[in-house]
Image: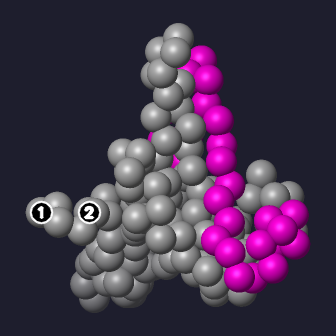
C-alpha cells in the first residue's frame, strides 16, 4: 500500500502539505495493523550484525544494527508520506485512530492538528546502538 499510495499523495500535496495514509482494520484479523506491523512495513525488519571470531578465539558479538530488506520509507523513498494511520474497529460502532509518523517525511505531520480529537501519535524511539526501537507516544503540549 505504501508504494502504490505514495505517488498519489505526492501529487496531491505538492510537497507542501502533510500526507496521511490511512489503513483500515475491520477487526476480523486481530492485530493486523498493530504498531509492530506498521513499523516493519515502513522500515523493514530490524537486524543485528554479528561478528564470529575464529573457533576458540572468543564468542560471537554484535557489531551494529540496521533495518533489513524491503524498507518502504528511507531518506530517499516515500518521503511524501508524513505518517501512516491505523484506523481500527474496536466495536460495532467504535473506532480508534493511531498515527505513526514517518521519520523521513519531507513535510512532517503536526500532532497538534489532530490533538482535539484525542488521536494518539507515535514516533520511533531510539534503542541500543542507535537502532529505532518501539513507537513512543508523542505527548501533547501541557501533558507530562
Mark 1: secondary structure: loop
Question: Where is residue 113 shown, x and y percent of the image?
Answer: 47, 62
The residue located at (17%, 61%) in the rendering is: 143
Query: Left or right: 41 with respect to 118?
Result: right
Question: Where is residue 19 shown, x and y percent of the image?
Answer: 68, 66
Say whether residue 11 is magenta: yes
The residue located at (32%, 83%) in the rendering is: 129
Mark 2: secondary structure: loop
Magenta-tinted stretch: 8-37
Question: Where is residue 116 shown, x and y percent of the image?
Answer: 38, 51
Mark 2 nearby-residue class (10 Å; few <14, some 14–19, many ≥20): some
Q: Is residue 80 above or below residue 3?
A: below
Residue identified by numbered label 2: 139
Query: Left or right: 75 with respect to 4?
Result: left
Q: Is residue 64 above or below residue 37?
A: below
For the C terminus, the image quarter is bottom left
Residue identified by numbered label 1: 144
Q: Mark 2 and mark 1: span between their CA atoms? A: 7 Å
Q: Are marks 2 and 1 in contact (CB under 8 Å)?
A: yes
Question: Where is residue 118 shown, x and y percent of the image?
Answer: 36, 45
Label whose residue precedes the other's in the sequence (2 or 1):
2
Amino acid at each position: 500500500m505504501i508504494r502504490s499510495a505514495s505517488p498519489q499523495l505526492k501529487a496531491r500535496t505538492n510537497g507542501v502539505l502533510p500526507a496521511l495514509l490511512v489503513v483500515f482494520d475491520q477487526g476480523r484479523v486481530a492485530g493486523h495493523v498493530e504498531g509492530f506491523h506498521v513499523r516493519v512495513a515502513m522500515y523493514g525488519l530490524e537486524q543485528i550484525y554479528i561478528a564470529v571470531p575464529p573457533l576458540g578465539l572468543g564468542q560471537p558479538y554484535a557489531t551494529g544494527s540496521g533495518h533489513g530488506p524491503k524498507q518502504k520509507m528511507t531518506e530517499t523513498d516515500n518521503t511524501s508520506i508524513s505518517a501512516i494511520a491505523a484506523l481500527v474497529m474496536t466495536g460495532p460502532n467504535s473506532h480508534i485512530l493511531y498515527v505513526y509518523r514517518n521519520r523521513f517525511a519531507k513535510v512532517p505531520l503536526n500532532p497538534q492538528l489532530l490533538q482535539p480529537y484525542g488521536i494518539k501519535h507515535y514516533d520511533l524511539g531510539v534503542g541500543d546502538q542507535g537502532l529505532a526501537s518501539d513507537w513512543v507516544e508523542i505527548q501533547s503540549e501541557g501533558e507530562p
